[in-house]
Amino acid sequence: MEKTIRRIAINTGGGDAPGLNAVIRAAVLSAVHRGWEVLGIRRGYASLLDTSTIIQLDANAVRGITHTGGTILGTTNKGDPFEYPVTLPGQPTTLVDRSDEVVENFRRLKIDALIAIGGDGSMRIANRFAAKGIPIVGVPKTIDNDLTGTVATFGFDTAVMVATDAIDRLHSTAEAHERVMVVEVMGRYAGWIALNSGVAGTADVILIPEIPFSIDHVCDKITDREAHGRRFAIVVVAEGASPVGGKMVVKGEEIGREVLLGGIGEFVAKEIAHRTGKETRTVVLGHIQRGGRPTTFDRLLALRFGSAAVRLIEEGTFNHMVALDPPVVLAVPLEVATSRMKTVPLDSDTVLTARDLGVSFGDAAPK
Ligand code: F6P
């Protein structure tokens, strides 16, 4: 049912991803063209807890930001109002439910709808606010590409481009020194970045969370190359990859957020060096994959998502997330988008292609 829209708000949550500013620009201009007012909620939901930090977003505020990285609204991956970390002097941090304050301020400010731009954590929070009566439209962002319901999230293409470029560069130095280069990429519990950049960058071994690896199989691939005169190798490891029967390597834990993954690259490199005797180096790409300008694909997707979110609000479709289902952008219920994580299907065309190209996933390749 259509209702008259006068004022909407926008926020960005979770880790930043290239394209956030393009979504904001498209959403703001699309809203302004309809005569709506737009409020910028800063640092996730923080401005709905402290409304003095809200900013007005008009055409001027979003000028010249389509190609920029980061987010003009700021973001946090520790800002879930349902589990808000609070630290009082001299006391340990505790998690407090402040969601009612958010709802109260949302109503008091007479905001008609919220565009929540974020990854799976942000979509889950959006879904909980939808259940509390806030009309929400989600926009799927994450370099990890692990959100269900959309073929792609914006930010992913840029991360893959950065990782592929790094792998390309590592090839020449690996070959010059006859070394094994282990490249650790992000992606959390999904192997999309490792798979796509590894295949495009012609890695010899790709390790992803979806396929537990055996270090023996990894070393077999390297020694087999050596036997054929290829005295260097490129191993791409997703941060969430783990050996058969082993655990993911965790860098740290902080209250109010997910565990920080990282370190598997170093583990794999040490094992390879120890078992093959090859000189081995590790490169952790880290946040470089998230920084800087979005690719053309991500910019366009982000602009399409931002504008589609406003059209959903206009037609009264709330509690949905905009999603890419080529060639169209459509809406999927937040319930569906948050129902499960989108991981790499083991029979996916890209996995099959990699196997046909002779890439090892560190497993016994299916016959
Ligand atoms: O979800 C995006 C992501 O970059 C993951 O790939 C990574 O595990 C995590 O965020 C890193 O988080 P932080 O920015 O807090 O270091």
Image: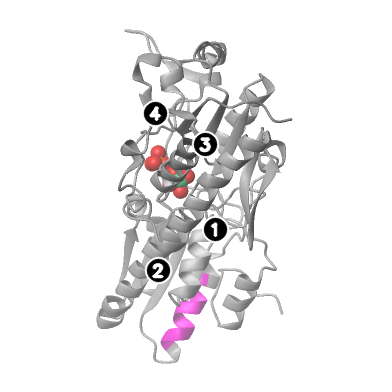
Q: Earlier in the sequence, mark 2 or mark 4?
A: 4
Of the residues shown, which amino acid type is indicated by label 4?
Arg
- Which residue was labeled with disc 1? 191
Q: Earlier in the sequence, mark 4 or mark 1?
A: 4
Labelled disc at residue 43? 4
Q: CA distance from mark 2 to mark 4?
A: 31 Å
Crowdedness near tag 3: few (<14), some (14–19) or many (≥20) residues, C-alpha within 10 Å:
some
* 1 lies above or below 246: above
Q: CA distance from mark 4 to mark 1?
A: 28 Å
**Where on the image, by quarter, is ligand 1?**
top left
Q: CA distance from mark 1 to mark 3?
A: 40 Å
Of the residues shown, which amino acid type is indicated by label 3?
Arg
Q: Toward which corner of the image does residue 192 lie, by quadrant?
A: bottom right
Crowdedness near tag 4: few (<14), some (14–19) or many (≥20) residues, C-alpha within 10 Å:
many
For the residue with label 1, is its CB less than 8 Å from the closest atom of ligand 1?
Answer: no
Residue 244 at x, y = what percent? 60, 57
Labelled disc at residue 164? 2
Labelled disc at residue 34? 3
Of the residues shown, which amino acid type is indicated by label 2?
Thr
Residue 297 covered by magenta stretch: no
**Mark in the foreground, 1 or 3:** 3
Q: CA distance from mark 1 to mark 2?
A: 14 Å
